[in-house]
Image (cartoon, rainbow, N blue to C red):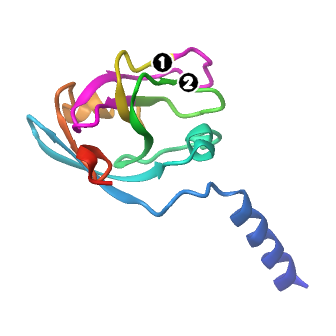
Amino acid sequence: MRALTAFILLAFFAAAAPCLAADETLEIATRNGVKIFAVEVARTDADRSQGLMYRKELPDGRGMLFDFQRDQEVAMWMKNTYVSLDMLFIRADGRIHRIAENTEPLSERIVASGGAVRGVLEVVAGTAKRLGIAPGDRVAHPMFNGRR
């Protein structure tokens, strides 16, 4: 009976988990050297809508990369997101366009890209400042420069 209960619980949690691909590596070249992150990539509308909602923590060195498939103005929010984040808005050429630091958890306030971007990288709040990440820094990931 315990094995059946454990199987049912495992199946439930597997079905409830986000259907994102396995972690991918993303690098950011800064004045202070290259910073490496393990990221989940949100490529579908459903994955982008879910984002990091309902997560209680996001470890350093991890993040979520939102792929918008083409350059466009984007708007993000923190609805149902419990962890304060830094949002890095990235152009198709891999350059960071803008950084929104220390976003407010659970807020429905719109955080706009302020220009056309291909993707957004969300990392735990304070990461950009701590690692010296700034607009103009280059992000290396297959999504940028038309490589995906």
Q: Is residue 103 magenta?
A: yes
Span shown in magenta: 87-110
Q: Position of residue 60 (x, y in %)?
A: 37, 46
- Magenta residues, dominant SS class: loop
Q: Where 34 sits versus 108, above or below?
A: below
- Along the polypeptide, which appears first: circle 2 or circle 1? 2
Residue 116 in view (yes/no): yes
Q: Position of residue 97 (x, y in %)?
A: 27, 24
Report the front residue among 117 and 40: 117
Q: Quadrant of the N terminus?
A: bottom right
Residue named by callout 2: 77
Question: How many numbered dots are placed on residues in this image?
Answer: 2
Rendering quarter of residue 102: top left
Please tell me the numbered disc located at residue 75.
none
Q: Label 2: few (<14), some or many (≥20) within 10 Å?
A: some
Contact between labelled residues 1 and 2, with CB atoms less than 8 Å apart: yes
Q: Is residue 60 magenta?
A: no
Residue named by callout 1: 111
Residue at the spot 43% in from the left edge and 42% down from the top edge: 67
Q: Where 91 sits versus 104, above or below?
A: below
Report the front residue among 134 and 70: 70
Residue 126 in view (yes/no): no
